[in-house]
Amino acid sequence: MTSVQRWVLGVVGMWLMAWQTLAVAQLPDFTELVEEASPAVVNISTRQNVTRRASGPMMPDMEGMPPIFREFFERSFPEGSQSAPQRQAQSLGSGFIVSKDGYVLTNNHVVAEADEIFVRLSDRRELEAELVGADPRSDLALLKVEAGADLPVVRMGKSAELKTGEWVLAIGSPFGFEYSVTAGIVSAKGRSLPNESYVPFIQTDVAINPGNSGGPLFNLDGEVVGINSQIFTRSGGFMGLSFAIPVDVAMDVVEQLKSEGSVRRGWLGVVIQEVNKDLAESFGLERPAGALVAQVMPGGPGDEGGLQAGDVILRLNGNDIVMSSDLPHAVGRLRPGSKATMDIIRDRKRRKLELEIGALPEDGAQAASPGTPSPHAPTAADNRLGIAVVELTDEQKKNMDVPAGVVVREVSPGPGAMIGLRPGDVITNLNNRAIESAADFTKIAGSLPADRSISMRVIRQGRASYITFRLSE
C-alpha cells in the first residue's frame, strides 16, 4: 500500500468517525426525562368477580322452604354442588397522576366493568382507587386515590403544538413489566378511527403493547402530550400503528368528569362526507376542502340553524375545515348551547351562518331510516342517465323529511348503471338543483353538461351521500 493510499484511508476513517459522532450527538438523550417523569406513572390492575356456571345441578333457593322439603334437597344435592364458585378476572394497564391530591388518568377500557381498581405507585405502595367518572367515547377514565401525602405529578403539554416527525416517548407497563420506556416519532395528527370520530388521535411509531394502555406519551420537554390508547396490528404486539389521545382533549374530559361526572359534546346533527376533486368541481370549489353536508337530521341543531344538504362547510369559528374529519373533532369540543359561526359554500357562493350547537345524544343516535319506497308505475326512462324514476308519495317525503325527490325503479344499461345507481335509490338533487318531480328530473337530466363533473344526491337505506360522474358528448 502506497503512502497516498494510506493517507486516503486515514482521511476516510477520520471522516467516518466524525460522522458517527455527529449522528450520535443528534439523537435525543431520554435519561433525564425518564428520571423526572417516571415517578408519576402508575401501574393499574383491576379485579372483576365473575360467577362461573356450575357443572352439576344447582340447588334451589331454600330460604322460607318447609323443613321437610329442605331436608330432601340437602340430601339430594351433595355439598359443593349447590353454588357456583366465583373467579376473579384481572386486567392490567398504565396510568399517570395528574394532581397532587390523587387524581389518576387512564383508559376507560383498562377499568371498564371492574369491581375493584388498584393503583401501584413508584414507591411500591398499592392503593385502592375510586372511579370518579369514565367516558367510553374518548376511552378515558378518571380515578382518585387517597395517598395521604403530596404525590409526584406529570407536567402537561399542549398536543396542538406537536409536529409530525417530533420525538415522543412512552412509559408504561407492557405485559406487566413496569416502567418500560419506548421512543419514536409522531407519524401523523388528527387521525379519525373507525370506532370514534370525535377524537383526533395522534399516530406514532412508538412501540406500544398490551399493558401500555392509559400510559402517558411525552415530548422531549418531559410534558405529557397524549395518552396511549390503541394499536393497529396483525401480530397483537407493537408491530403496527400506535394511537394516542391528545392531552388537550383529555384534560377537557378530566375537567368535565371532575365537575359533572360525565362528558357533554357539541353536535350538529348532520351526516357529512369528504369533498374529493370531482365534488369540488361540481360545487364550484377551486380545490377539495371542507365537509360536504349530505344529510341534515330533522329538528337537529343544523336543521334549526339553517344548514342544508349540499352545503360545504369550510370554516368553523375561524378555523379551517380541511378534511371532513376535522368537523366532528371541532364541533365535539364546543359546549352545547354555545354559538358557532360557519363559512359555507351554497349554490357556488360563499356565505356565513350562525347557529347554536346542540348536545351529542348519549347513544349517538342518528336519523331514523325512511320507509321503503312504495311501488308505483315508473315514468318513461327517456333520459340521458338510462333510469326509470317515480315521484315520492307524501308519506315517503314525510318519512325521509325531504320536500321532493324521485325513486329509481329501473336501471337500464347506461350512465346510471355505470355510476352504481340501484332500484330503490332516492334522488333529491341533480347538478346542484333540487328535483321537484319525475318530469323535473327528466328535464334536468336532459340539460346536463358534457365533460364536466356533475353531482347527484342519493339516499340509500336511509343514508344520504353525494356521488359525481361525467357525461360524454
Image (cartoon, helix red, strand yellow):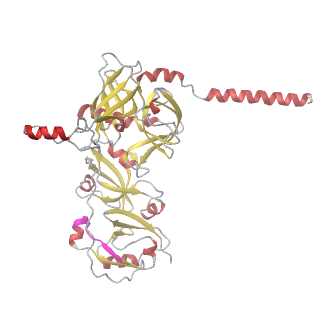
Q: Position of residue 128 (x, y in %)?
A: 30, 25
Q: Give above or below for 119 relative to 204.
A: above
Q: Is residue 401 magenta?
A: yes
Residue 64 visible in the displayed image? no
Residue 306 visible in the displayed image? yes
379 with respect to 240 (left or right): left
Give the residue at x 38% y 72%.
422
Quadrant location, the N terminus: top right
Q: Give above or below for 389 relative to 111.
A: below
Q: Total of numbered circles in the picture?
A: 0
Residue reaching furthest to the top? 149
Q: Which is more toward the observer, 220 or 453?
A: 220
Q: Quadrant of residue 372?
A: bottom left
Q: Position of residue 145 (x, y in %)?
A: 30, 24
Q: Is residue 222 magenta?
A: no
Q: Which is more toward the observer, 74 or 202?
A: 74
Give the residue at x 57% y 25%.
29
Q: Position of residue 273 (x, y in %)?
A: 39, 57
Q: Quadrant of residue 98?
A: top left
Q: Which is more toward the observer, 87 or 17?
A: 87
Q: Give above or below for 217 relative to 364.
A: above
Which stretch appears magenta?
398-409
Residue reaching furthest to the right? 2
Q: Which is more toward the observer, 131 or 340?
A: 131
Q: Position of residue 8 (x, y in %)?
A: 85, 31
